[in-house]
Image (cartoon, rainbow, N blue to C red):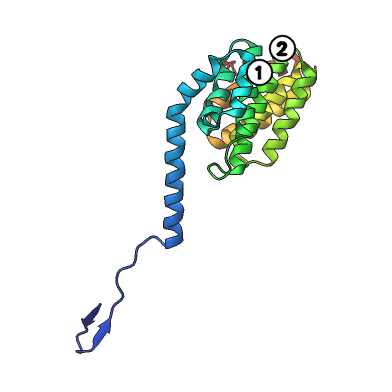
Amino acid sequence: MAEDDPSGHVLEVAAPQSSVPVEAAELLECLGRVRSNLDRERVQAPDLVGELLSLPGEQREEQLQQQARYHTWGVCELLVARSLEAAEPAESECLAVLAVTGADRLDPACHAAALIEDLKARAWAAAGDARRRQGDIAAAEEALRAAASCLAEGTGDLLVEARLLEFEASLRREQGRTGEAAALLKMAAARYRETGEEQLLERALAERDAILRREGSNEPHRPAVKSIS
């Protein structure tokens, strides 16, 4: 558009530009679509998981592999959560393995590959801890290696790493390697502190203190707090 300056000359003034560059606007639009899709998946997940878990145990994994409607982030995320809540280790393992199966089938075009690896690391950690609780230490070790491999390909999420460190600490404690377990819990606590997760920080420190007390350590102890999943 044109406008006059005080001297009478005509000035060409560019039309107002958007304050958001085109590339940034496209990125925001893409993120908005991803968020909307994720919200929809989470809303649908309880019904889908309920439908899946209503099947006999031997049919669950087959249906999860074959039916695309189960291949969503929401379903996998909820299966991990249910695994952590399950009182019976065998059921916890089954749910976690289903989560791994589902995560392997997520579309990288809809969910970033690194985020999928984070989710798989969480699921493998849940499966491994369930195996540890059943006394299958060799299988728990296999799950730990799988989780660590996924973590290496993930986003570097400190919460995912801290959860895996806690799982490894439980496994090392089960093996009588209490010094390693205490060191791993200290590392997990540092990550929880960095992310501001106070309740999880207290859990990790309480577990570490329990190990140190049993080992007769002279280090100062913190009061124990209730463990959470």
**Res 172 seen here:** no
Label 1 Cα neighbours within 10 Å, binned few <14 / some 14-19 / many ≥20: many
Query: Quick check: 60 above or below 70?
Result: above
User: x, y percentage for residue 75?
Assistant: 52, 27
Q: Amino acid at mark 2?
A: Gln
In this rendering, position of residue 172 left or right of residue 224: right
Camera-side residue: 179 or 48?
48
Does 124 sit above or below residue 24?
above
Judge by depth and name the residue closer to the eye, 201 or 21: 21
Say which of 222 and 31 sits in front. Answer: 31
* Quarter of the figure with residue 10: bottom left
Q: Residue at x 68, y 20 (%)?
A: 129
Residue 93 disc label: 1
**Which image quarter is the C terminus in?**
top right
Kindly indicate whether the residue at mark 1 contacts the one at mark 2 (C-beta within 8 angstroms): yes
In the rendered image, which residue does mark 2 sit on? 134
Disc 2: CA contacts within 10 A as few (<14), some (14-19) or many (>=20): some
Report whether 229 appears left or right of 215. Answer: left
Q: Amino acid at mark 1?
A: Glu
For marks 2 and 1 on the same chain, the one whose residue lies earlier in the sequence: 1
What percent of the width, then of the height, locates residue 207?
65, 19
- Which residue is outermost to the top? 88
How many numbered marks appear? 2
The mark closer to the camera, 2 or 1, is 1
The quarter of the image holding the N terminus is bottom left
Residue 128: x and y, percent? Answer: 70, 22
Residue 47 in the image: state x and y as whole percent. Answer: 46, 22
SS at mark 2? loop
